[in-house]
């Protein structure tokens, strides 16, 4: 494995660097995957969307976002299994389906739809997006892309380049409280308990996987 690249930059400069990495991947034949990992509230989705928008400005359809969160187990399944309170932890995802989806998506030459996650209903939405046949770069983002434990270890070999976003824990906590409260679906007490019992332990777990990334970006931001 090549030596890990470590940067401390503001979000705009992080985007510039990721555009350069994407350009290097696009030289390769076929489809490639750039993975963006990090704890909950690190800004993975925001950066992934900005990267895809920047790449598609010059060549529409060149890149597409693929969110890991679409592979949450559905709320009805979590409730049936008695693990709804654990939602967001590694065992509340369908890793087998996620691995199979990425492998198929990387190999196909046809349009392919995938699931997303809606915070408006706090559940999975099927066929949330479609990756066009001409798409060359998949920007996959999610907490657990770099975990070394079973069954998650099977995801990293599918990534052609991996980035870990490192954001201070206290900042992440504030972001998560704001995120959980935005749709007004839960009480502040419930949100605080969920952040303490699920989100912050997930942050600590994911932080231990950053040594497996090709690049670690410490984001310099105040909010």
Image: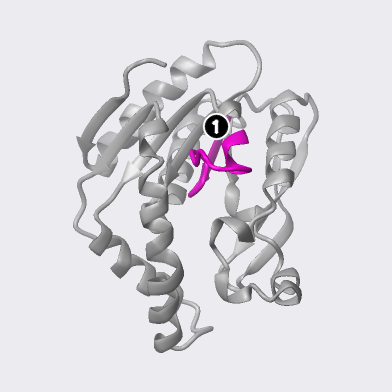
Quadrant of the rendered image containing residue 106: top right
Q: Where is 189 relative to 122, above or below? A: below
Q: Which color scheme is applied?
A: one colour
Residue drawn where x is 32% and y is 18% of the image: 3
Residue closer to the observer: 180 or 27: 180
Q: Where is 170 relative to 46, above or below? A: below
Residue 62, percent from left and from top: 59, 27
The residue labelled by disc 1 is 156
Q: Is residue 147 magenta?
A: yes
Residue closer to the observer: 71 or 54: 71
Residue 171, percent from left and from top: 25, 62
Residue drawn where x is 50% and y is 41% of the image: 147
Residue drawn where x is 38% and y is 73% of the image: 196
Q: Quadrant of the N terminus?
A: top left
> Extreme right residue here?
110
Residue 72, percent from left and from top: 64, 59
Q: Is residue 82 magenta?
A: no
Q: Where is 105 relative to 91, above or below? A: above
Task: Give the residues drawn in magenta, as a range.
Answer: 138-154
Q: Residues within 10 Å of mark 1 (few under 14, many from 20)?
A: some
Judged from the image, the secondary structure of the residue bearing numbered disc 1 is: helix
Q: Quadrant of the C terminus?
A: bottom left
Residue closer to the observer: 45 or 2: 2
**Left or right, 198 with reference to 81:** left
Residue closer to the observer: 153 or 145: 153
Residue 10, percent from left and from top: 22, 42
Residue drawn where x is 46% and y is 24% of the image: 22
Q: Where is 29 relative to 84, above or below? A: above
Res. 62 in view: no
Tell me how many marks there are: 1
Res. 26 in view: yes
């Amino acid at each position: 494995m090549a030596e890990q690249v470590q940067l401390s930059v503001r979000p705009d400069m992080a985007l510039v660097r990721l555009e350069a990495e994407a350009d290097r991947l696009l030289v390769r034949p076929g489809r490639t995957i750039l993975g963006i990992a990090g704890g909950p509230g690190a800004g993975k989705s925001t950066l992934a969307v900005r990267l895809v928008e920047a790449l598609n400005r010059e060549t529409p359809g060149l890149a597409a976002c693929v969110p890991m969160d679409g592979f949450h187990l559905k709320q009805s399944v979590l409730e049936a299994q008695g693990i709804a309170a654990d939602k967001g932890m590694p065992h509340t995802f369908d890793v087998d389906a996620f691995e199979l989806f990425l492998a198929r998506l990387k190999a196909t030459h046809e349009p392919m739809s995938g699931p997303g996650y809606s915070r408006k209903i706090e559940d999975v939405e099927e066929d949330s997006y479609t990756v066009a046949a001409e798409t060359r770069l998949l920007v996959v983002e999610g907490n657990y892309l770099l975990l070394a434990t079973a069954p998650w270890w099977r995801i990293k070999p599918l990534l052609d380049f991996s980035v870990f976003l490192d954001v201070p824990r206290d900042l992440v906590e504030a972001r998560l409280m704001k995120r959980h409260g935005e749709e007004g679906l839960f009480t502040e007490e419930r949100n605080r308990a969920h952040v303490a019992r699920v989100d912050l332990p997930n942050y600590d777990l994911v932080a231990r996987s950053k040594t497996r990334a090709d690049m670690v970006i410490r984001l310099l931001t105040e909010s």
